[in-house]
Amino acid sequence: MDVKKDYGQSLFIFVFGLLSLVVVDYSMRQFSGSLNNLGMSEVVWFSLQIIIMVVSLFVFTKNIKTLSVSKKILSSLLFMLLGAVVYLCVIYGYVFSTQIDGF
């Protein structure tokens, strides 16, 4: 199992996608003059997060297709756990650090 290929590419896509989303939203809020104004609409915000997740999962499943079923399940669970931790750190770190959306 090549960890760099199996996890690295997918996590890079996921982290880069989320960070890009945060940068664009923050920039939109800065250009409007107040962080409490709506940056991206919520539909766009959550749709882009889902698209980033789907692309990342697609790349991950493509990279682990040669593993046995038990290793695929274990790898997938580990990847989803890593993805959840990254998601919480990036998105909630952004929300809490900028104190947007009533926090």
Image: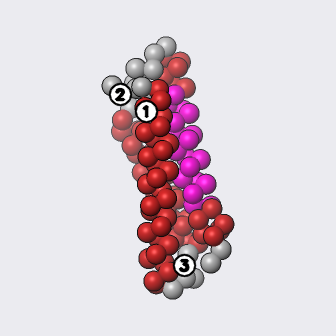
Q: Earlier along the polypeptide chain: callout 2 or callout 1?
A: 1
Q: Which residue is mark 1?
A: 95
In the rendered structure, which segment of residues is drawn in magenta? 9-26
Q: Earlier along the polypeptide chain: callout 1 or callout 3?
A: 3
Q: Which residue is mark 3?
A: 65
| Secondary structure under the numbered disc 1 in the rendered image | helix
Question: Tag 1: Cα neighbours inside 10 Å, few (<14), some, or many (≥20)?
Answer: some
Left or right: 37 in relation to 86 = left
Q: Which residue is mark 2?
A: 103
13 is within the stretch colored magenta: yes
Q: Disc 1 and disc 3: Cα gap in Å?
A: 36 Å
Above/below status of 58 relative to 41: below
Query: Do the residues bearing badges 2 and 1 touch, measured as CB atoms within 8 Å?
Result: yes
Instruction: Kindly identify the amino acid type of the residue bearing the numbered disc 3.
Output: Lys
Instruction: Kindly identify the amino acid type of the residue bearing the numbered disc 2.
Output: Phe
Q: How many marks?
A: 3
> Where is residue 26 drawn, in percent x and y?
51, 28
Residue found 47% across the figure and 37% down from its top: 93
> Where is residue 74 drawn, in percent x and y?
46, 75
Question: Tag 3: Cα neighbours inside 10 Å, few (<14), some, or many (≥20)?
Answer: few
Image quadrant in which the N terminus is located: bottom right
Above/below status of 34 relative to 49: above
Q: Disc 3 and disc 2: Cα gap in Å?
A: 42 Å
Q: Earlier along the polypeptide chain: callout 3 or callout 2?
A: 3
| Secondary structure under the numbered disc 3 in the rendered image | loop
